[in-house]
Amino acid sequence: MTQQLIDVKNIYQTSRKIRHCSLDPSIRCLAELRTCQLNGCEGCSHNTLAEATALGLEEKIQHLAEWSTNKTFSARERAALAWCENFIKHQNGDDKIRREAIENFTGQELADLILTVQLTSTLNRVSRKYAN
């Protein structure tokens, strides 16, 4: 039985399709960047970082690691970033984080946020594995 290798290029192309989702592009960019930070994948953040800079998010990029205490982040951004952290660090359904997400996003936006975090995380992990 032959082992099939993971096609990193295909995962990347799929993750780029999420750029056309219902989420505000700045929130999607911040969620992707935070996911990359949490997964320790600097290489994956390159394209998203360029997009976030083009969207004028330089100050938020600089303070992304301390989003929960920095006043420059909106309630929607905080809810998205809390979702990212909970998924990456704990992978559980924290009720408070779930309520905040439901209060701040439509059902479609929340589905797109979940997909963004999951695809970015998958890309991070696969890229790190095959980079070595």
Image (tube, rainbow, N blue to C red):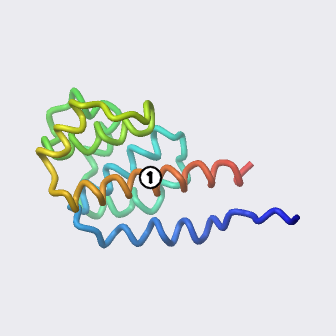
Asked if residue 119 is positioned above or below residue 78 in the image, the reply reads below
Query: Picture coordinates of residue 73 (x, y %)?
Result: 18, 40
Q: Quadrant of the N terminus?
A: bottom right
Foreground pick, 52 / 91: 91
Query: Picture coordinates of residue 10 (x, y %)?
Result: 58, 71
Query: Picture coordinates of residue 8 (x, y %)?
Result: 63, 64
- Which residue is drawn at the image coordinates 28% and 68% (left, top)? 21
Identify the residue position indicated by label 1 in the image. Answer: 118
Q: Secondary structure at mark 1?
A: helix
- Which residue is drawn at the image coordinates 30% and 73% (left, top)? 20
**In the image: residue 94, left or right of residue 128:** left
Asked if residue 29 is positioned above or below residue 14 in the image, the reply reads above
- Which residue is drawn at the image coordinates 61% and 70% (left, top)? 9
- Which residue is drawn at the image coordinates 24% and 34% (left, top)? 97
Q: Amino acid at mark 1?
A: Gln
Query: Picture coordinates of residue 56 (x, y %)?
Result: 23, 57
Location of residue 84 (image quadrant) = top left
